[in-house]
Image (cartoon, coloured by chain):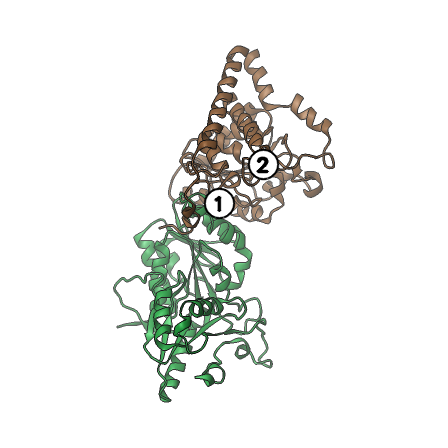
Chain colours: A green, B brown
Amino acid sequence: MREITLSQAVNEAIAEEMRRDDTVFIMGEDVAEAGTPFKVLSGLVEEFGTARVIDTPISEPGFMGIAVGAALTGSRPIVDLMFGDFIFLIMDQLCNQAAKAHYMSGGKLNVPLVLRTNLGATRRSAAQHSQSLQALVAHIPGLKVAMPSSAYEAKGLMKTAIRDNNPVVIFEDKLMYQDKAPVPEEEYLIPFGQANIKREGRDITFIATSSMVQVAEKAAEILALEGIEAEVIDPRTIVPLDEETLLASVKKTSRAIIIDEGHQSYGVTAEIASRLNEKAFYHLDGLCCTNSVRDSSSESSVVAGGHEQTHPPRLQDQELAGL
Amino acid sequence: MYRQMVRIRTFEDNANQLYLNAKMPGLTHMYSGEEAVAVGICEALTDNDRITSTHRGHGHCVAKGADFKRMFCELLGKEEGYCRGKGGSVHIADQSHGNLGANAIVGGSMGIATGSALRAKMQGSDDVTVCFFGDGATAQGLLYEVMNMAALWKLPVIYACENNGYSEYTKTEEIAAGVITARAEAFGIEAFKVDGQDVLAVNALTQKLVARARNGEGPFFIELETYRYHGHHVGDINREYYRTKAEEKDWKENRDPIIRFRSYLVSEGIATDKEIDAMNAEIAQDAEAAVAYALDAAYPDASEVDMHVYAA
């Protein structure tokens, strides 16, 4: 099978859906000729023109609000938010408007909108360009949250998101844009709420999101050398969350570590651990543990340790000692 | 237009009573006094044209064609309400007449209205969207972001600023620097100021602007000078610390949009006092019947609380 980068996969997904459905369009800062700073959207404006690949002013709440209005009245906008950190700027439009319109209207209004943005403290971009804010939006009912872990996942999840009738937030890891993976030429979609068992094992379950799936897989390889068989599961979407698959795995292995690049406190890992501890309690040999980013901001300096300080992979020396 | 203005006033009188009798959940914000704005504008629109409304939204909803029964049901949280009781007063929406919904965030729907207009332009539809908001909402930054884009992209949207003189409990002159219409003009948007108590003037201007917006000449901005008879919300009874009773009396007695239009209709021989009184009585009866219907109507099943979080 051919291999393409995560960037190309996202680009293909958007192009295919724009060809299939002319109500789909994309808007955001520098999305047209520039193709975004990460060059993910290069070439789209040449095919679809500036009427459907729309460069906006640097007005995140404004273009997010405009996308909500377009979605409410029959378009399928994709909003490109250059950095995940800018979610704070659009919170009212995302959480008070987009997330609630269907509910407040008693099911009459829909907001079929995709917000594509990114996460990851991995470019030394300092405190305001490095956050992983998936927990923040996953907290709000009415929003769906997808976290692709490879080019294959990014394409399939993006296509599903565009066809979904709800607001969907997709977090791509900034450092994965150039990562290649096998992606079929044929069309495919990845349904939401169906976790992917990346590696089977009987001794412990690793539940990992986004690029942390690679970290978990690497850890599983190391453990295998010592005869410990780890199961690695990628939930793909944290809302909706495939509890069934996670619970079945944990009931089998009796232990779990959940790995996510968000902050530790009140985060994605805490939520998943809490659900597993509650619902699989009598099957566990120890409480499910969490592994995420310490509660400080991301710094720019390499002197302070750079991203290693805030990055989660501390698997070997910490939790694994207890296995 | 007269009928619609009286329908709004009658609706509000009944809604206020429901609140005072503790039969209505939550809060509500009365539109009384501002009827000529909603009616003058909405009478220039078709069902295919969209509006976005505000927390003070009953007037827009009635003016855009909503039915009393379903509106009262919504206010009382009943199953037959426009939003199955989930939206209530401050989120009432009536998609069938193009009302995209009231919004309880001040200025919250400015993006939505502009996005609706972007959709119309992209899909080659000739509908126009009117964005209602108050003078208080001109203090929100979102307005300037979306007006900038609407002007850049020549969108068929009309920003209708209902200036009732008060930003909640504070005089607008204390919160708004400069001239409100100049803010739109800064983006190259044609802006107009009109007496919002004169339904004919509002309607004539809106008709002109809607036709031009359909023709691709939008966006436009209208500031409508008006007055709210009640407080910011129904619980805002003692208002003397921010405005005088004499001021309220002056607006009610000398600038009331319904009284003004009625005397015009009679003096021009368009309708007689008798005909108008009969119409008013009929509207009062309709409202009374709708309130009784809504009070008796069924609540949605409790299981519906978790419904409509996600669309299928």
**Chain letter for the residue marked with disc 2 in the picture:** B
The kind of residue on which mark 1 rests is: Ile
**Residue B39 on image: x %, y %:** 52, 28
Q: Judging from the image, what secondary structure is the residue with disc 2 in?
A: loop
View extreme (front): residue: A282
* Residue tagged 1: B112
Q: Residue B29 bears which disc, if any?
A: 2
Q: Count the marks.
A: 2
**Picture layout, residue A262 above or below residue A33:** below
The residue lying toward the viewer, choosing from B101 and A104, is: A104
**Residue A243 on image: x %, y %:** 38, 65
Label pair 2/1, CB-CB below 8 angstroms = no
**Picture layout, residue A218 above or below residue A86:** below
**Chain letter for the residue marked with disc 1 in the picture:** B
Does the image show residue A208?
A: no
The residue lying toward the viewer, choosing from A35 and B272, is: B272
Q: Judging from the image, what secondary structure is the residue with disc 1 in?
A: helix
Q: Earlier in the sequence, mark 2 or mark 1?
A: 2
Instruction: Judge from the rendering whether residue A296 lies leftward or rightward of residue A71; answer left or right.
Output: right
